[in-house]
Amino acid sequence: MSTVLCVLYPDPVTGYPPEYVRDEIPEITVYANGQSAPTPRGPLGFKPGQLVGCVSGELGLRSYLESLGHELIVTSDKDGPDSTFERYLPEAEVVISQPFWPAYLTEERIAGAKKLKLALTAGIGSDHVDLRAAAQAGITVAEVTGSNCVSVAEQVVMLILLLVRNYLPSHTFSEAGGWNIADCVERAYDIEGMRFGAIGAGRIGLAVLQRLKPFGLSLHYTQRHRLAPEIEDDLGLSFHADAESLVRSVDIVNLQLPLYPSTEGFFNDALFAKMKRGAYLINTARGKLVERDAVIRALQSRQIAGYAGDVWFPQPAPLDHPWRTMPFNGMTPHVSGTTLSAQARYAAGTLEILQSYFASAPIREEYLIVDGGNLAGTGSASYQLT
Ligand code: NAD
């Protein structure tokens, strides 16, 4: 019998289950790059469209795990030495966690987790695991690659429009009973004709570029690996050798890199200073990619016109985190990758990975981040250990 320790975000304050506003969600079987959506065997343990990312939802895993005789512990109590997570970690063979409410698997915690074999991210982005320590301890790290890329890409497009068109202040005026048209539009522009740049054009970054094409922007990108010429031609992409060149040229930037030690603080005062005055930055990748106070300085000095995203450090963000109240921000809690649509895919993918693991069968290559003591699969293409 194995202990599976699963950390999920708390239930809705109004109770569980919620009253669903829709009866069904579209079924997505294949992603844009040809990868098939998760294909677990047998019953799912939930109905797609249900809220399964919170504690009572349990990712729909209980019946599957208990039918094999395993113990499932689900908690949202994840931080501090007296947390439920710390209490059960020494017993856990599998830890499941989500980026939205991450159970940080630090080097110290990994050292104490003597039975841990699989750290599974129900979603995308495994930076809450110390990948180097996991590799050294022989722990496999896997995530549900592809599961919420479109969910995030849609959010990026929305955030661009929210910021550039000054939507949020206009909504606040209307809710407050106002009709302040001049106040609403004094910072409002169309995105048509603007220049947009992606830093990182992987699965999400590319999906954003594809969705922006019909808006009539000029599209730019930079990343480690150049995209195929057919993709560049189809989207009319301009490639930049580095982020500095890109930010000097564009009006709107989307940061969509993975977080690892050498991308920490990637966006700093020096890079903000190279942006066009009045540019916008959207970051739905990870909070630590941007230096916390540099973005505040850039907004206060009007070097940039707005910053939006859903990623912070730490998570949950403390009440006094300055990004909650900085000017011209379009921040939300970490939600873009956990729509009910996304949950259906990442919960099914979590089940698929567990089925492979408990059958001692290979986990899909694209789901692997660390395996056999080193980066593997998607991990080799997207992460570095330093
Ligand atoms: P991906 O692996 O498909 O793409 C990442 C790209 O970044 C790769 O093409 C890689 O070559 C490139 N890259 C890596 N390091 C680089 C560097 N130093 N310089 C330039 N390019 C570099 O990943 P993805 O699915 O597009 O996701 C990207 C990130 O988005 C994830 O790592 C995660 O942190 C974040 N994410 C956030 C949410 C959310 O809910 N907000 C959901 C999913 C993913």
Image: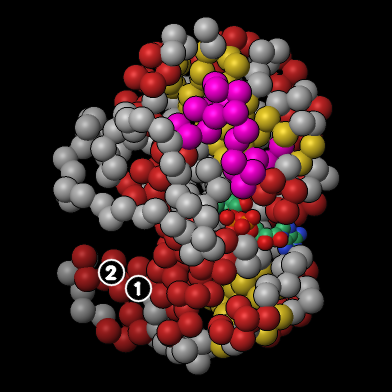
| Residue type pointed to by label 1 | Tyr
Q: Nearer the viewer, residue 351 or 385?
A: 351
User: Magenta stretch: residue 368 in it?
Assistant: yes
**Residue 78 location in percent, x, y?**
52, 24
| Residue type pointed to by label 2 | His
Ligand 1 falls in quadrant: bottom right
Q: Nearer the viewer, residue 350 or 196?
A: 350
**Residue 305 location in percent, x, y?**
54, 76
**What residue lies at 39% left-to-right and 53% top-to-bottom?**
29
Q: Nearer the viewer, residue 65 or 300?
A: 65
In this rendering, position of residue 148 left or right of residue 88: left
**What residue lies at 28% left-to-right and 55% top-to-bottom?**
26
At label 2, counting other C-alpha atoms closer than 10 Å, the crowd grade (few under 14, some 14-19, many 20 or more) is few
The magenta segment is 351-370
In this rendering, position of residue 47 left or right of residue 30: left
Looking at the image, do the residues carrying marks 2 and 1 touch, with CB atoms under 8 Å apart? yes
Q: What residue does disc 2 label?
A: 171
**What residue lies at 57% left-to-right and 69% top-to-bottom?**
206
Q: CA distance from mark 2 to mark 1?
A: 6 Å
Secondary structure of the residue carrying numbered label 1 = helix
Q: Is residue 326 visible?
A: no
Q: Is residue 129 visible?
A: yes
User: Magenta stretch: residue 138 in it?
Assistant: no
Q: What residue does disc 1 label?
A: 167
Taking 167 as reference, is 102 above or below it? Answer: above
**Residue 62 location in percent, x, y?**
37, 20
Secondary structure of the residue carrying numbered label 2 = helix
Q: Nearer the viewer, residue 190 or 72?
A: 72
